[in-house]
Amino acid sequence: MSSRSIIAISIVVLVIILGIFWFMRPPPPPKPAPNPPINISDGDLPDICRKMTFEGVDSIVCEIDLRTHRIDLARANADGEAYGSLKAFMESRPQDVRPILAMNAGMYEEDLSPVGLYVEEGNQTSELETNDGEGNFFLKPNGVFFIGKNGTPGILETGAFAAAAPDVRIATQSGPMLVINGQVHPRFEPNGTSRLIRNGVGIRDANTVVLAISIEPVSLGSFARLFKDGLGCANALFFDGTISSLANDRKTLVGGTDPVGPIIAVFGKK
């Protein structure tokens, strides 16, 4: 048999073997089902909240006047056990003393303890985190949302907060900053490919705190511009993505059963 015949037969055999492997290969994993749309009626929203469409993405925006409302932080019950979810937090409170609005308010460790600074009613239980690390929290500059004992709200980049050392009633550290002194975080792409349900907080003026949660997947760049251009916040801080949750005083509206660490709760002043 000639060498050419041997080569031809070898090629045929190789093609047959490859064909067998092709047909015997395992089927590809199914594509994940798209997230179901989040449907929230206007009647479910507290009076301080509204739907807003920005750059084609729907969000819930809550504008909190501190002259008529109070913002608290919560994380654990009287026994020191983390609530674990927004739903559990709301159900732990009698109906008549529930906040009108609650939202996850920062990132957490495996035991649900805060990543970084956490101050609740003047009691600091976790220190300011200034080290480098992995993940969104460490996409610097990160920062701190706080309300001073004088009632003035603020968001400062972590280094600026450490230098100023404000006397705070509540504080939660998170990251990254979304808007810093009127500028979008310098490391954000204008509209990156990572699209998640996201939430965060911004400061409009000395009396107004703005909370926002997207109800459609959104990029960090677009979410930052929502605060800067859509809501007029010179400084804004990212709370989280994927597990972002929102509740009124009757039920959870977004998420709710996902694990949470710090929780921001809004009450009407009597």
Image (tube, rainbow, N blue to C red):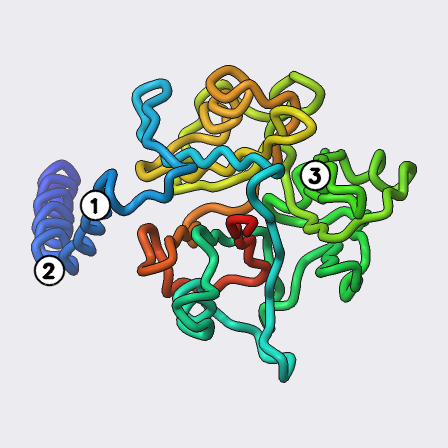
- Tell me which residue sits at (51%, 49%) in the image: 268
> Would residue 31 appear left or right of 204 to someone viewing this image?
left
Q: Amino acid at mark 1?
A: Pro
Asked whether disc 2 touches disc 1, contact meaning CB atoms under 8 Å apart, the reply is no
Task: Name the foreground residue: 66 vs 213.
Answer: 66
Provide residue 6's location: percent of width, then percent of height.
13, 45
Question: Distance of mark 1 from mark 3, alpha carbons?
Answer: 31 Å
Question: Which-is-in-front pick, marks 3 and 2?
Answer: 3
Residue with the mark numbered 2: 24
Disc 3 secondary structure class: loop
Question: Distance of mark 2 from mark 1, alpha carbons?
Answer: 29 Å
Where is 94 relative to 157, above or below?
below
Lower sequence index among marks 2 and 1: 2
Q: Residues within 10 Å of mark 3 (few under 14, many from 20)?
A: many
Q: Amino acid at mark 3?
A: Asn
Q: Amino acid at mark 2?
A: Met
Provide residue 97's location: percent of width, then percent of height.
47, 65
Where is 184 relative to 44, above or below?
above
Provide residue 105's location: percent of width, then percent of height.
56, 51
Lower sequence index among marks 3 and 2: 2
Residue with the mark numbered 3: 142
- Tell me which residue sits at (78%, 52%) in the image: 129
Disc 1 secondary structure class: loop
Where is 233 relative to 113, above or below?
above
Task: Farthest residue to the bottom: give it.
Answer: 79
Task: Name the foreground residue: 123 vs 181.
Answer: 123
- Tell me which residue sits at (46%, 18%) in the image: 230
Question: Which-is-in-front pick, marks 2 and 1?
Answer: 1
Where is 47 relative to 122, above or below?
above
Residue with the mark numbered 1: 34
Asked whether disc 1 touches disc 3, contact meaning CB atoms under 8 Å apart, the reply is no
